[in-house]
Image (cartoon, coloured by chain):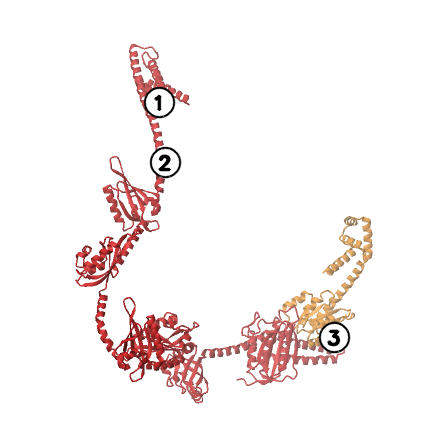
Chain colours: A orange, B red
Amino acid sequence: MTSDNPIVFVVDDDYRIREALSSLIASVGLRVTAFGSAAEFLEAEKPDAPACLVLDLQLPGASGLELQRELADGRGPPIIFITGHGDIPSSVRAMKAGAIEFLPKPFGDQELLQAIDAALALDRKGRRQRAELAELQKHYALLTPREREVLPLVVSGLANKQTAAELGTSEITIGVHRGQIMRKMGARSLAELVRMADKLTLMRGAGHG
Amino acid sequence: MRVLFKAWRYGLAVISCGFALALALPLDSPSSCFFLAVMVSSLYGGKGPGVLSVLLSSLAFDYFFLLPKYSFAMQPFSSLQFTAFLGAVLIVSLLIEAKRRAEEARRQIDVKYRQVSADALAEARKSEARLRLIIDSIPVPAWSSRADGATDFVNQRWLDYAGIAPEEALGWGWKVVCHPDDVDRTMEYWRSVLASHEDRELEARLRRFDGTYRWFLFRVCPLRDESGNVVQWYGTCIDIEDRKQAADAVRASELNFRMIVHSIPGLVATMSPKGDLELVNQPVLDYTGLAFDALKDWWATALVPEDELPRVAAEWKQSVETGCEYDVEHHMRRADGAYRWFYVRGLPLRDTHGQVVRWYCVLTDIEDRKRTEEALRSREQQLRLMVDSIPALISIRTATGEVETVNRQCLDYTGMTVDQLKNWPEAVHPDDRADTITLWKYAIESGNPLDTEVRLRRADGVYRWFHARALPLRDTEGRIIRWHALYVDIEDRKRAEEALRSSEHQLRLMVDSIPGLVCTETPADGVELVNRQFLDYTGRTFEEARQWATVGLIHEDDLARVIDHWRFTRETGQPHHIEYRVRRADGVFRWFHVRGLPSRDSTGSIVRWYYLFTDIEDRRQAEQALRASEHHLRLITETIPALVWRTTPDGEIDYVNRRVLEYTGKPLEHFGNAGWLQLLHPDDVESTIRIWRNNTQTGDSHQVTYRLCRADGTYRWFDVRGEPLRDSEGRVVQWYGICIDMEDSKRIEEALRNTQERLSIASQIATVGELSASIAHEVNQPLTAVVSNGNACLRWLSAQPPNLAKAVEAAQRIVRDGKDAGEVVRRIRALFKKAAREEVSLDLNEVIGEVLGLLRGETAKRRVMVETDLGQNLPPVTGDRVQLQQLILNLLLNGIEAMDPVTDHPKRLFIRSIQQPGDTVLVEIRDSGVGLKDPETVFEAFFTTKENGMGMGLAICRSIVQAHSGRIWAASGEGPGATFCFTLPLQLSPVS
């Protein structure tokens, strides 16, 4: 569990909370770094390791929710909100925006630590997926423009003949393209290619916002 | 057509015969049917068809009816029958033919006649139209009426003139335009014309369309038939208005002339060229008492006395013959028989050829003159006597100036004989001698009277002044035959005159130099004299001053009054005493007081009025201003909504205004003699008397509050102030005072204080309520830390091996944060505490810190950045901690809330405290919120920009600051947001 050396970030403007939480989290053997404001957190160097963020909802300057929005590009760590007010509208917003947990102060140590575990697990999974996608993209970058045109038609289930008619070329040429695509993408079967293309499309869709 | 018609006629004959046959066969009465057929054919067909029908009838009769039937052959009886039938038919046919012809002829004649009459009618119409045109266009109203007098036509001119419709004029309708005064006359005239059948004329007035009446001459003319009966009357109305007016004018002028002649107060007669009496005026008749006819033979009456008659007659005869003017004096007998002298003058009036047309004679009564003449003559003798006896010197000189004779007085005075006096210059004062001789010479040469003053020597050698007057006596041809000289002793008068002159000079000097306008007036001649000031002031000449009533010297509003008064004083002789406005040279009117006194002669009648005009404009203006200001002041005093009073120096009330009377419902008398004390509330009487006594003794202005009984018996609080009025020496002359009703304001003040107090508490609680979330946060923070630290501590302890150092750290933090939580709770309790006001020495920075601590949650929640700049070594102030906390809390909350809508820039709350010169501490709270629209009014109660605010927060702040003798204000700061500042004094003065 601790093999990949995960890290927990704490952002709270009250030093007493920072100290208390740092101590609590450290007591279960996790790395902890605490910040007094969102800005400090954003500026800080973050190690390439599974991470999660324990974030106070009310912060001077940029609030917790704002920080959450800023980190919502997918690369940010999962967030556990803690709050002294716990009003319903902000908690709903926080959860909608993908918060792992929303803990009203004061909270028990179990609740916090379990939330941290869940968040770290999620982050690990996310990190893995991001790595796979990066691999696929690397393969996809090898394709020529013509092959990128052919790929969607192939994965949509068209036969070579149909694809050729669609693109106004010969069946043989399409066959050659297809072979090249399979090779470059490292797909062992059409089914695998379809799955890859699916992921890429997702990724591309996400990328295009 | 014609052929067709002819065929039809013959056809008719055939058809009628056929028809007759058809009818005759069944009826078996052939003859009547055929007669009918022949009649019809002859009547409508004419001769040919008639013959044809006769023929056909005969044949048919023969064939069908005569035996043997259905054969033309005849039996002997039948032939007789046939002949009879034929004859009858022929006769019928011929008769009918004759009738038809006659009819035809008549018809033709008829047609011809009709044509002729139509032509005649057209001709007649044409001529009638022409006539009508003529009648309508002749420039005279014309009309016609029937024999019975009813009008049946009026022409257009008539209608135009009268402006009525033709129908209205017809019959007797024209009467409406007749002048009401003339209607009866006109009707009578018209009846007489109708009765006599003679044309006559009448003048009557007719109304024009515009309502004016004009005179018309009516002429009427009868139209008679052969037998001489009147069938129609024709009349015209000729406008004679102008002629009438001219005639009237002539008549009027004649009447006028006659009136003049009759009314002149002289005797006038006119005669024919031959001398026959034509006319005499009334005075002649009145005087002589004779009838005009008797006067025609005046010489035969005793009008002129017998002894004068021949002379008069001769003169008159001569004048008539020669045409010379007649000019005679003679006696004329009056009605009562007395003779009086008359001067009779006759003038001939000639025509263009110089022929005498008429004599005009005026007879003037000269009886009185004549008598006078005679009296004079008889008195001459007496005069001679008088000459000698009058107390003056008289000398009679020849035409050349030599002394001829003198009266006795002359001899007596000079002591010289007549002969000695021939050398008269001897008697004249040497200084006057040369002048006198020259004057005499001049008088004798020119014939002008001599008038001089000269000194003559008395017998005793004393020279005395004489007034010498000499008049020439002329003969009938105007030549001077003698000089009469009169010397009147004027020595005494001369002396008096001289004395008078010198005194008058002095007087004039005096009059001209007194600073007033002076004017004298005599009852007879009006203004006699005005002084220089009068002329200078009015800028008028003396002549204008004499016309004082008409030259605008006196203001027109005053003039009538002045003249009335002037008349009154003139009539009664009472002193003149009046004020009025007199116009200055520059046109400005100034008020003058004019006094006039009469001076009387020994008999007591007024000989002269003396007037003195004193300029009182300034005094009058001052008076007016004073009066106006007094009125104004009185008005103010009576109307100000306060009770006003005045007392004598020793405190006796001698005046109260209307409001006092109204309020107390007591009359003024009630207040005197310390009566007003009875109106005071019994509890206030003693203190009031004490203060009042003290002040009347010292003269200090006083102020006291007491309850005063209103008319309805209720007591109300009054704020009473009195001020002394002092004379120039500082003595109190009077006390003036007012009582202001402060019952209401006192009540309101109290109510306000109560309300504010309650509001302050309410607001405190409301604030706390509002802050509850923040307070919860404040408590939560340390609690969260405590819980987490506790958990951490447990974990450190239960770790293998236990990390004691970390556990201790965590436990230490628990203790620290627990204390924090306790502190928070303590501060909240302080807020809730409704403790009595407690004055303690405070460090304002500490108070600010406490409040900021309380607000930390709120600022965090709203993401407000709090910055402070708290002054070092701030001296303490005195005040109530809780109230000051409340003050700062309110101001900070106000700032935080003002920044709620802000999204485009950071929310900054800046707090500064600093010691200021003048021993005050300034606290400034600046936000970057929406700012203030009107910094002046934000402290008003219920002023709010917030949706849910009560608008009390800042009002409470103000009352807190004021209770601490501080000052609070607001300003829209630089950049966004507002700034609130308050100052508190370092050393508070004790608050009552």
Secondary structure, mark 3, is: helix
Residue under pointer 2: B126
The residue type indicated by label 2 comes to Lys
Which chain letter goes with mark 3?
Answer: A
B703 or B314: nearer the viewer = B314
* Residue drawn at the location 80% of the way across and 59% of the way down: A141
Contact between marks 1 and 2 (CB within 8 A): the answer is no
Q: Nearer the viewer, mark 1 or mark 2?
A: 2
Residue under pointer 1: B44
- Rounded to the nearest angstrom, the CA distance separating label 3 from label 1 is 160 Å
x, y percent for residue B988: 57, 85
Give residue B252's quadrant in the image: bottom left
Locate residue B693 relative to residue B248 in the image: left or right: right
Secondary structure, mark 1, is: helix
Contact between marks 3 and 2 (CB within 8 A): the answer is no
Q: Nearer the viewer, mark 3 or mark 2?
A: 2
Give residue B340's quadrant in the image: bottom left
x, y percent for residue B483: 29, 73
Residue under pointer 3: A26
Locate residue B269 relative to residue B510 in the image: left or right: left
**Residue A77 drawn above or below residue B877:** above
